Image (cartoon, grey):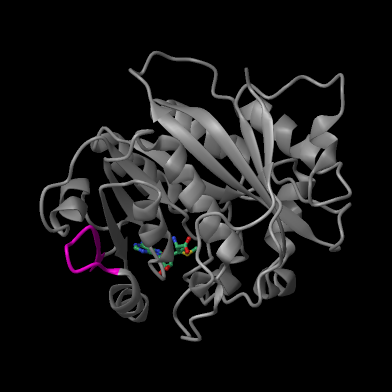
Amino acid sequence: MPSISRVGEYTHLTPEDLKPPGEPEVFFEPADTEIGVWVAADLLPSGGGGTVLDLGSGSGAAAAAMARAGAARVHGVDNGRQTLRWAERHHATPDGRVSFALGDYAVLGPRELLAGAPGPLPRPLVVTSNPAYVPLPEEAARTRPSISGGTDGLKWAGAIIGHARALDADLGLTIGSYSTPRRAAALLAEAGYRIAVVTLCPLPFGDFTLRHPEQVLALEERGEAVLWRGGPEPLAYFVVGLACRRTDGTPGPDGAEDLMGLLRTAARSTTTRLESLDAPGGAPPPWPVRILDLPPAAARHHW
Ligand SMILES: C[S@@+](CC[C@H](N)C(=O)[O-])C[C@H]1O[C@@H](n2cnc3c(N)ncnc32)[C@H](O)[C@@H]1O
């Protein structure tokens, strides 16, 4: 029976992970990172095991947390040199359980991405990604590789979904409620993925998005982005973690309207608990929904 649950604190990141790295080219947004770990945990075998290929692994804190959550192996790939150095120094393990490699997942093929990982990679394989997902105007987009998701927020989604599918893996994808979620759901369904669990986390706009909101507001105007305007911050959105299972390809509903309905209902809330999702009478979402109602981060850093 689909249900709504709430988590009020960081479960996967450690107190050390909640301290900003202080390096200019290392992404730091703990809520995003935490949600990515929940999504991986939703897809990993319940007794532990399996491998995660984390595309755009950033600081590596997510990869390390996925291993603590039970993955037998986690391999992260990122195209930021400083990012990679940070991840290797702080989160790679000597036994190779958590490893990282420099690479551009928009250029490398799926087998090449896996080839950079040392040692055997036990199945099942889960591909995860918390890609740059902010829809930005073109000029602004060029300057922010860690957050710019092109004009619809889904610039990287095609490559990520393609890798997961080619590797016959389940897929954990994180987007924003402004990253054209209807289109994201359609892309996933077309590739044979079925949404299994949704995790939502309310988050105020980052500084750069606040200074360049045009594209997000245009998408909202067209009904393609859901923003949260009723909460404590004037402009906020929901980070949306989509834990997706690979299907045999039999066409089914894409869940796009259910996802939009869920986000619009959440956006009627006035508190970070997203209490409007509890209102009686509405159609319950077809998947379990987890709400992360997290304490604000000490800092945020998007480059
Ligand atoms: C939004 S950050 C997420 C980082 C990490 N997954 C987390 O949740 O903390 C996106 C990351 O993807 C990396 N990235 C962006 N485009 C990439 C690409 N084409 N190939 C590999 N990494 C990429 C950036 O360097 C950045 O570290």
Say if the magenta span includes residue 219: no
Q: Is residue 117 left or right of residue 139?
A: left
Q: Is residue 142 left or right of residue 258?
A: left
Q: Quadrant of the N terminus?
A: top right
Q: Residue at x 38, y 54 (%)?
A: 68
233 or 256, nearer to the observer: 233
Task: Judge whether 7 appears above or below 190 on screen.
Answer: below
Quarter of the rendering containing residue 104: bottom left
Q: Is residue 200 left or right of residue 122?
A: right
Task: Judge whether 161 appears above or below 27 on screen.
Answer: above
Quarter of the rendering containing residue 255: top right
Question: Which stretch appears magenta?
Answer: 92-101
279 or 5, nearer to the observer: 5
Q: How many marks?
A: 0
283 or 191, nearer to the observer: 283
- Identity of the residue furthest to the left in this view: 119
x and y percent of residue 286 in the render? 63, 21
Q: Residue at x 80, y 61 (%)?
A: 235
Task: Judge whether 290 appears above or below 211 on screen.
Answer: above
Figure quarter occupied by ligand 1: bottom left
x and y percent of residue 10 in the render? 59, 58
Q: Residue at x 27, y 40 (%)?
A: 49
106 or 103, nearer to the observer: 103
x and y percent of residue 48 in the render? 32, 39
> Can residue 154 be spotted in the picture?
no
What predominant SS class does the magenta segment belong to? loop
x and y percent of residue 113 in the render? 21, 54
> Can residue 197 be spotted in the picture?
yes
